[in-house]
């Protein structure tokens, strides 16, 4: 049986751990922010505590073991796919880890939970600089260009894309009358993307350009 002061200490620590992780997500304007992560961490702690009480003494994990399943539904809710990438996976992982840390607090593993929180913050905050660096050297962008059809220039814009050492992942062309509308999904460095955009913006044959 948990003593009142021990129970209170667990709840406070759970709120603090969830608050630290949630604050980082809130600052980055993610779908699961400050209050959400706190509630997830606190809920995991309470479920773990109640599991120890309800299952005592022979089956103490029967409630806590279902936390992972429940967290899976919450995590799936923040993941969504855009046209070029999948978003929300990091936030879903933060939710999953917050629940794990909450369970650790509920079991009384305070040092491990605090250390885990610090490691989570290191990955989310410090490693984000590396993530931005990787994004600069390998960006995915979509380009849509409308231009008059000329047989001699049928592959003009794909040649320009290749000229800047960008990789075409997908392409789609549509012809209406004498007008061609082409769409490309392209990967490459941020610098090369900017050079390509500047080149297309100065092309007098282009009637419409979105990027």
Image (cartoon, rainbow, N blue to C red):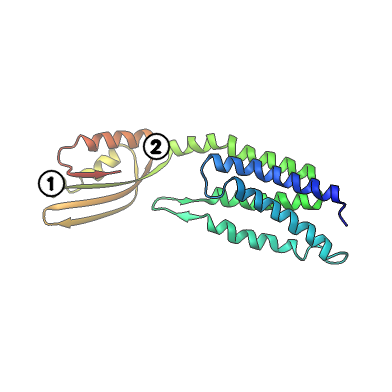
Question: Which residue is pictured at 17% across the width and 49% down the height?
Answer: 154
Q: Can residue 109 be seen? A: no
Q: Quadrant of residue 52?
A: bottom right
Rendering coords of residue 155 (x, y %): 21, 47
Q: Count the marks.
A: 2
Q: Nearer the viewer, residue 14 or 193?
A: 14
- In the picture, the quarter occupied by the N terminus is bottom right
Looking at the image, residue 123 sits to the left or right of residue 65; the answer is left
Q: Position of residue 170 (x, y in %)?
A: 33, 53
Which numbered disc, 2 or 1, marks the residue that appears first in the sequence? 1
Taking the image as shown, residue 170 lies to the left or right of residue 30, namely left
Q: Is residue 64 above or below residue 149?
A: below
Label 1 residue SS: helix
Local crowd size for mark 2, using a 10 Å CA cut-off: few (<14), some (14–19), many (≥20): some
In 3D space, how far apart are the residues under numbered discs 2 and 1 (Cα atoms)?
29 Å
Nearer to us in this view, 49 or 121: 49
Residue under circle 1? Answer: 152
Q: Residue at x 78, y 52 (%)?
A: 106
Instruction: Write the residue at 21% across / 52% down.
Output: 181
Q: Residue at x 45, y 39 (%)?
A: 135
Say whether marks 2 and 1 touch (CB < 8 Å).
no
Left/right of residue 140 with respect to residue 206 in the rendered view: right
Residue that mark 2 sits on: 189
Instruction: Determine which of the numbered discs, if any, sits on residue 55 in the image.
Output: none
Q: Quadrant where the C terminus lies?
A: top left
Residue 121 location, x and y as percent? 64, 39
Label 2, secondary structure: give it: loop
Spot occupied by residue 28 in the image (x, y as percentages of width and height): 52, 40
Q: Is residue 143 left or right of residue 78?
A: left
Whether residue 53 appears in this view of the structure is: yes
């Amino acid at each position: 049986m948990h003593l009142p002061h021990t129970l209170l200490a667990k709840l406070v620590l759970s709120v603090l751990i969830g608050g630290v992780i949630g604050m980082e997500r809130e600052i980055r304007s993610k779908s699961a922010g400050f209050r959400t992560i706190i509630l997830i961490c606190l809920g995991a702690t309470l479920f773990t505590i109640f599991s120890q009480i309800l299952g005592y003494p022979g089956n103490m994990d029967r409630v806590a073991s279902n936390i992972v399943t429940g967290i899976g539904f919450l995590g799936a809710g923040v993941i969504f796919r855009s046209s070029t990438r999948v978003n929300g996976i990091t936030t879903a992982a933060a939710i999953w880890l917050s629940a794990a840390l909450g369970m650790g607090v509920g079991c009384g593993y305070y040092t491990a939970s605090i250390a885990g929180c610090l490691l989570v913050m290191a990955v989310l905050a410090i490693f984000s600089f590396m993530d931005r660096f990787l994004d600069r050297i390998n960006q995915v962008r979509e380009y849509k260009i409308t231009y008059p059809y000329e047989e001699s220039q049928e592959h003009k814009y794909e040649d320009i894309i290749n000229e800047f050492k960008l990789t075409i992942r997908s392409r789609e062309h549509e012809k209406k009358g004498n007008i061609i509308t082409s769409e490309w999904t392209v990967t490459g460095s941020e610098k090369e993307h900017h050079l390509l955009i500047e080149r297309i913006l100065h092309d007098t044959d282009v009637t419409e350009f979105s990027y």
